[in-house]
Image (tube, rainbow, N blue to C red):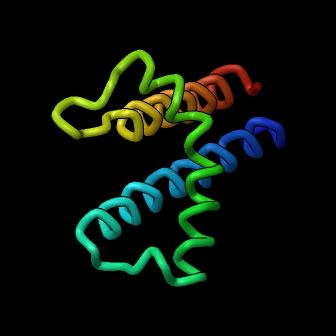
Amino acid sequence: MMNPISYLIYTVLSIYEWVVLVAVIVSWLTAFNVINERNAFVHTLLRILYNLTEPVFRPIRRVIPPISGLDLSPLVVIVLIETAKYTIRWLSFSYGI
């Protein structure tokens, strides 16, 4: 059994991981002109995803700049989220935290 606070943090991290994945997919779709950025719904979705992910991506981009146009910050964020989720599970099941 997980502590309710640990479960809440774990759930928020899981949701944010999905937000990062959606942001990556949407950025690919806009880069390949599959979706139209001038559409009001798409523009709103892009703005929401940008506001949710950019504050986390920006510090990582300062340390690891894009390499040949490839932005590695989403990958780093997903690895950090998975590490945090694993640590929460381990602490919760090992120590009941």
Residue at figure coordinates x 61%, y 54% from the top left: 15
Compared with 31, 39 (above or below) is below
Residue at figure coordinates x 31%, y 38% from the top left: 71
Q: Quadrant of the C terminus?
A: top right
Residue 67 on image: x %, y %: 21, 29
Q: Is residue 45 left or right of residue 74?
A: right
Total labels: the figure holds: 0
Q: Quadrant of the N terminus?
A: top right
Q: Is residue 53 left or right of residue 37?
A: right
Give the image quarter of residue 53.
top right
Which residue appears farthest toward the front when viewing the image?
38
Compared with 15, 78 (above or below) is above
Compared with 85, 91 (above or below) is above
Residue 20 on image: x %, y %: 49, 51
Give the image quarter of residue 70.
top left
Residue 44 on image: x %, y %: 62, 72
Q: Is residue 71 left or right of residue 42?
A: left
Residue at figure coordinates x 48%, y 79% from the top left: 38
